Image (spheres, rainbow, N blue to C red):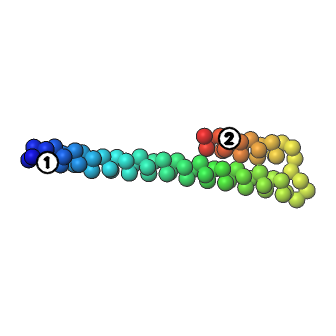
Amino acid sequence: AEQAKSNIEAQLQRRADLIPNLVETVKGFAAQESEVLTGVAEARAGLVGALQKTGGADAGELANANDRLTTALGRLN
């Protein structure tokens, strides 16, 4: 019984020791997601700004804004 208890405690300790690694992994993904979402929001704002530009945006400006949005959206995958 003591050996079984010792084995369980060892497994629980290993499990607890892995938590910091898990937390760091999640933090890394959260930072990346934040960058991606910020990029999408900025690209969208650029496209909306080009579309709402007084006097209208030229075709090149609209194409560039659309390309930036397409690239930013591609990073979501």
Q: Nearer the viewer, residue 35 or 13?
A: 13
Q: Position of residue 68 (x, y in %)?
A: 71, 44
For image coordinates 14% across by 48% down, the residue present is 5
Residue 61 in view in this figure: yes
Q: Residues within 10 Å of mark 1 (few under 14, many from 20)?
A: few
Residue 4 falls in image quadrant: top left
For image coordinates 19% across by 46% down, the residue present is 8
User: For the C terminus, which image quadrant?
Assistant: top right
Extreme residue in the front direction: 1
Q: Position of residue 2 (x, y in %)?
A: 8, 47
Identify residue type, mark 1: Lys
Badge 1 marks a residue whose secondary structure is: helix
Q: Position of residue 74 (x, y in %)?
A: 65, 40
Q: Position of residue 6 (x, y in %)?
A: 13, 46
Residue 17 in view in this figure: no
Mark 1 vs mark 2: which is more N-terminal? 1
Q: Nearer the viewer, residue 30 or 4?
A: 4
For image coordinates 89% across by 53% down, the residue present is 56
Q: Are marks 1 and 2 in contact (CB under 8 Å)?
A: no
Q: Residues within 10 Å of mark 2 (few under 14, many from 20)?
A: some
Give the residue pinned by disc 1. 5
Where residue 42 is drawn, which disc sits there? none
Identify residue type, mark 2: Thr
Badge 2 marks a residue whose secondary structure is: helix
- Give the Cα distance between marks 1 and 2: 55 Å
Give the residue pinned by disc 2. 71
In the displayed structure image, the side of residue 27 where residue 3 appears, left or right: left
In the displayed structure image, the side of residue 43 where residue 63 appears, left or right: right
Say which of marks 1 and 2 sits in front: 1
Extreme residue in the left direction: 2
